[in-house]
Image (cartoon, helix red, strand yellow):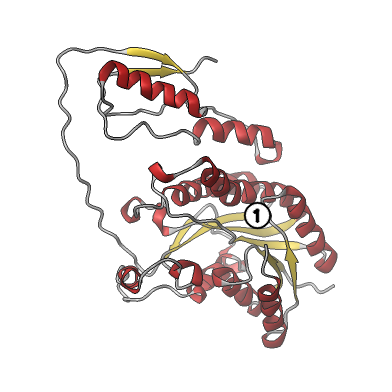
């Protein structure tokens, strides 16, 4: 086995992941091309690495959202190269839905792929990462308040979770000498980005940067190359936006709600992680007041587990309570309604 640093890039058979794999190979890394379904595209990346660089590469099929697949990916990497130095979490799932269009199925798939997969794969990786290793997550520039776009509700929610995971892991893994950072691309010219968009929409996104163009996968790969390098050993816990200076002006339209002179309140028992309880809360509020204006989602579950102690059960509990709540019915207005959860 060579002494070359070894990089795993998830979802690297095409798009940004492919460009990242090629760049890391040019930098001298041995590269593991992880893919879920397109074996031929993954092999093309392996062949290109072998023909254009001096680096080694293999492809490994697997969905890192499945713990057994993640364990197999690690094993095959260690069997081939004997070490793991860099992991780039590129695989993601995106759906364009507003909150009213989100279903349990789309919620589950978004959080399974975009949050659960990188979290538990990281948990599996920790014992095998070399000192001085790099964990590099990919998020999106859309998580910035100034660049929020409509119909990205689920995607930005999951990527916001990834950014907080980055900051926490940077503290937890720093003792091992491992840096953890997150790269946030702006609109990037890939097949996935272009899918479902008109040329007019694509040009709109291109016009959001001072350069008047979309980012290219190689632009993102260059930033990841730096974060993975020895020169970035003091860069840790950072959210790096790589978007060419993208800026979106958001206009907020609001109206003042009249405050009724009488102050009335009701108490409704319920667990908002249970859809039936959420529906009951809405129904009872509308039955008493006829409208809903403000919903303050305060209920939460706090867990102080380190990543190594997180279990599937605790993960599900925290996300059920803190994330998987449903919207209060739109088009209505309320006076005061308190929802409490019996503990």
Residue drawn at (37%, 22%) of the image: 283
The number of callouts visible is 1
**Observer able to see residue 174:** no
Q: Position of residue 173 (x, y in %)?
A: 65, 48
Q: Position of residue 244 (x, y in %)?
A: 38, 70
Q: Is residue 152 above or below residue 45?
A: above
Q: Which residue is mark 1?
A: 178
From the image, which quarter does the N terminus lie in? Answer: bottom right
Classify residue 35 as left or right of residue 332: right
Circle 1 packing at 10 Å, graded few (<14), some (14-19), many (20+), is many
* Residue 108: percent from left, percent from top: 56, 43
Rendering coords of residue 21 (x, y %): 63, 72
Q: Quadrant of residue 212?
A: bottom left
27 above or below 192?
below
Q: Nearer the viewer, residue 71 or 306?
A: 71
- Disc 1 element: loop
Q: Residue at x 42, y 64 (%)?
A: 186
Identify the residue at horizontal 26%, vertical 22% (top origin). Answer: 290
Tell me if I can see residue 259 in this picture. Answer: yes
Q: Judge by depth and name the residue closer to the eye, 150 or 286.
A: 286
Instruction: Looking at this view, name the residue that lies furthest to the bottom.
Output: 51
Vertical order, 318 against 9 (above or below): above
Q: Nearer the viewer, residue 143 or 269?
A: 269
* Residue 246 occupies quadrant: bottom left
**Viewport quadrant of the C terminus:** top right
Left or right? Give the position of 124 relative to 178. Answer: right
Residue in the picture at 31% in, 35% down: 330
């Amino acid at each position: 086995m060579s002494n070359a640093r070894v990089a795993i890039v998830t979802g690297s058979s095409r798009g940004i992941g492919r460009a990242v794999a090629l760049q890391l190979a040019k930098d001298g890394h041995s590269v593991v091309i992880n893919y879920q379904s397109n074996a031929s595209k993954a092999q093309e990346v392996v062949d290109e690495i072998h023909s254009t660089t001096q680096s080694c590469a293999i492809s490994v099929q697997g969905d890192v959202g499945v713990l057994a697949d993640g364990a197999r990916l690690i094993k095959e990497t260690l069997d081939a190269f004997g070490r793991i130095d860099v992991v780039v979490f590129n695989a993601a799932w995106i759906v364009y839905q507003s909150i009213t269009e989100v279903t349990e199925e789309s919620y589950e798939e978004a959080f399974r792929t975009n949050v659960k997969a990188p979290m538990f794969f990281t948990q599996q990786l920790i014992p095998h990462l070399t000192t001085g290793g790099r964990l590099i997550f990919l998020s999106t520039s859309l998580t910035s308040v100034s660049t929020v776009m409509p119909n990205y509700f689920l995607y930005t929610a999951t990527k916001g979770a990834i950014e907080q995971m980055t900051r926490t892991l940077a503290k937890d893994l720093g003792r091992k000498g491992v840096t953890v950072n997150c790269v946030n691309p702006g609109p990037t010219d890939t097949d996935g980005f272009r899918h479902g968009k008109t040329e007019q929409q694509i040009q709109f996104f291109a016009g959001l940067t001072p350069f008047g163009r979309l980012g290219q996968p190689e632009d993102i790969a260059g930033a990841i190359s730096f974060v993975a390098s020895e020169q970035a050993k003091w860069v840790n816990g950072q959210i790096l936006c790589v978007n060419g200076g993208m800026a979106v002006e958001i206009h907020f339209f609001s109206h003042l709600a009249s405050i009724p002179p009488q102050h009335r309140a009701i108490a409704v028992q319920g667990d908002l992680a249970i859809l039936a309880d959420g529906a009951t809360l809405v129904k009872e509020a509308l039955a008493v007041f006829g409208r809903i204006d403000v919903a303050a989602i305060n209920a939460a579950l706090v867990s102080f587990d380190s990543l190594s102690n997180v279990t599937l059960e605790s993960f599900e509990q925290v996300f059920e309570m803190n994330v998987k709540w449903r919207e209060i019915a739109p088009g209505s207005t309320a006076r005061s309604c308190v929802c409490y959860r019996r503990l």
